Image (spheres, helix red, strand yellow):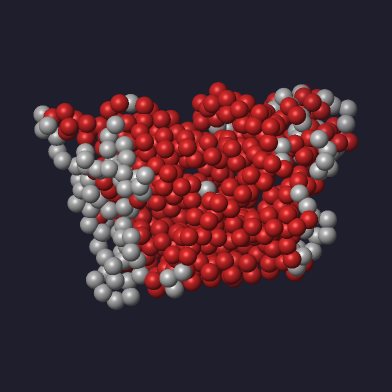
Amino acid sequence: MSIKPPFTDLEIEKAPSGFYEGYSLPIALISKTVMTALVLWALIWPGNANSVLSAVNSTLLNGFNSFYIISVGLFAVFLFILAILPATGSKKLGPADATPEFNNFSWFSMMFGAGLGVGLMVFATAEPLGLWGSNPVVLSGAVEANSEAAVQSAYRYTFLHYGFHAWAIYVMTGLSLAYYAYTRDMPLTIRSALTPLLGKAANGFIGHLVDVLGVVATILGVSVTIGFGVSQFVNGVYAVSGMEWLMNGDAEAPQPGVVGLIAALVVIMGLSILSAVSGVGRGIKYLSNLNLVLSLILLLTFVFFGSFFFAMSKFGSGLVDYILHFLQLSFGAYGPQTADAFAAAIPSAAQSLPAEDLSAVYSSATSPWGSFSGFAEGLPASAAALDAEAIYAAGEQGRQFGWQAGWTTFYWAWWIAFSPFVGLFLARISRGRTVREFIFGCVIAPAIVCFLWMTILGGTAIDLELNGDAAGALIGASNTAKLFATLEQMISGGFLAGITIMCVVLILTFLVTSADSGILVMNTIMSGGEQETGIKHRIIWGLILTAVIGALIIAGNSGAAANPFGALQNAMIIGALPFTIVMVLMLISLIKALYRDNLREKAD
C-alpha cells in the first residue's frame, strides 16, 4: 500500500523589497502591533493594566491550571517513550549518513548556555529556601515548614521545577523543529512543526498566527527572565557599591526600586543592542565561554566554604524521591475549591458562622502562603471555640491549588514561553543526532547539572538556616538577594567582595547574551527560519523588548498590591497559554509524522 508523501511545500511569503525585505509582513506587523499595544496600555493606564492582567491571569488559572500541569506531564512521558522505543529512538535527525556538527563536549556546553544562565543565578538559593518553607507536603500538614523533615520535599519540588519536566518542555519544541528541518528539509520556524496537521493551511493565516504566538511567547518569556536577572543585578551592584538610590528605601529588607530596575534595564538592553549592531557579538561569545569558568568558580566556592556534604546527601535522596514521585508530579493536578465546597467540608458547627466571618475563614484556610498557627491566631471571635484543625484541613484542596497555580504552573508557563527560544537553539545544534541522543542528551544531562547546582548552593543556604548561623537572614531576604545574602554568611573580606563582583559580571553577561539571543530568535521566526537577519530589525526588537519589560515593571508597581514583577509574570502566563496549545498540537503532529514515516520506510 502506497502512502502519500508528507506535505513539505511550506511557502512563507516574504516582502521582496523595502523596510521588511526578507520578512513575513503579517508575522512582523501583528507581533509589533500586539507588543506596542501592550506597552502603551501599561504606560498610559498602569493601574488598569496591572489589575486587568491579574484578573485575567486568575481566571485562566482557575480554568487551565490542570491543562498546564497535565500537558507538561505528557511532554515528559512522551519524550521518554520516544527515546526508549527502538523504532523512534534510532531515527536520525538528518540523512542516514549525517554526523553531528559538534562534538559531545561542545554540544553540552552550548546546551547549558541556552537553557541555564540567569535563572540558576537567581533561584539557586531562592528556590530551595522558598520550597523549604512552602510545598504541598508542608501544606498537607505532614511536615513542619523550615524543619529538617521538610528538606526532602523541598528538593522534590526543586527538582520538579528545574529537572526532567522543565527540559522536556524545551525538547518538545526543539525535537519538533529539528525533525522537520533535518528529515524533511523544512525551515526552522514554528509552523513547520504543525504541517502534519495543517497541511497547506500552514502557508496561510493559520500558519502566520502560529508563528506570531511563538514570537509573543518568546518576548514574554525572555522578558520575565531578564526582569528577574535585572533585579539580581541591582542587588549585586548595591552589595558592592552601597548605592541606596537603587533600592526601595526599606532599611530592614531593601529590595530593588523601580528607578534602579529601569536604570539597570536600560544599561543591560543597551549593551545587548550594541552587541547586535557593532560586531561586539564575537566578544559576547567569548564572554559566554568565560561564564562557564566563572560559574565553576562560584560552584567551587560553595563546595569549599559551604555545606558540601550536607548538600550531597540531599542530592542523592532528593533525586531518588523525585524519580519515585515522577508520575504523581507529572499528572497530579488540582482544581480550585469554591466557597460552597469549603463550607460543605467544614464541621457543622462552623457552618453557622456569620457570612462575613465564614468568608474570612475560607480565605485564610485556602491561602497557600500562610501556616496553621497563623490561621488559628487569625480566627474571628465567633470561631474561637471551634475545631481549628478540622476547619483548616477542610481547606487543603484550596491551598494545594493555590500553591500549584502560583508556583509550578508559573514555572511551566515560563519554560513554555521560553521554549521557542531554547528549542530553536537546541534544534540548530543537533543535526546528525539520533532522536534518543537528542532527548537523553537535552533532558537528562542538563537536569543533572541543575540538580547539582541547586543542591550545592541551595543546600548550603538551608544548612545555614537549620544550624542557626543565618538566624533567618536568608529566609527574610528577597529572592534576588538570597544568593548575595548566602555568600555574606559563608565568606568575608576581600574574598567576599571579589566573588560578589564576579557574580555581578556573570549576571550581566548572562543577561546581555540572553537578550541578544532572544532578539535573534524573534527575527528568525519572522523571517521564515532565516538565521541571518537585518541589523535594523534587531535594534527595533531590542527597543520593543526593553519597552515591554520597563512598561510592565511600572504597571506592576501600581495599585494596592504593588509588585514590580506582578504584571510581567501575569502577562507571561497569559501569553504562554496559547503556545501551550500549540505545543500539544506539536506532540500530536510528531506522533503522526513518526508513525507515517515508519510506514513509508516499511513500504520502501
Pick the residue in front: 283 or 195: 283
Please tell me in which quadrant of the rendered image residue 366 appears: top right
**Residue 335 position in % (x across, y down):** 58, 34
Instruction: Name the residue rendered at 36%, 58% in the picture.
Output: 525
Instruction: Name the residue rendered at 58%, 61% in the picture.
Output: 508
For this view, does 331 lie left or right of residue 96? right
Q: In the rendered image of this protein, does residue 163 appear above or below residue 505?
A: above
For this view, does 361 lie left or right of residue 457? right
For this view, does 382 lie left or right of residue 403? right
Q: In the rendered image of this protein, does residue 124 appear above or below residue 157?
A: below
> In this view of the protein, can residue 341 be seen by the observer?
no
Please tell me in which quadrant of the rendered image residue 316 appears: top right
Marks counted in the figure total: 0
Q: In the rendered image of this protein, does residue 187 appear above or below residue 23?
A: above
Pick the residue in front: 158 or 563: 158
Q: In the rendered image of this protein, does residue 208 appear above or below residue 149?
A: below
The quadrant the N terminus occupies is: top left
Instruction: Name the residue rendered at 67%, 60% in the picture.
Output: 501
Pick the residue in front: 378 or 503: 503
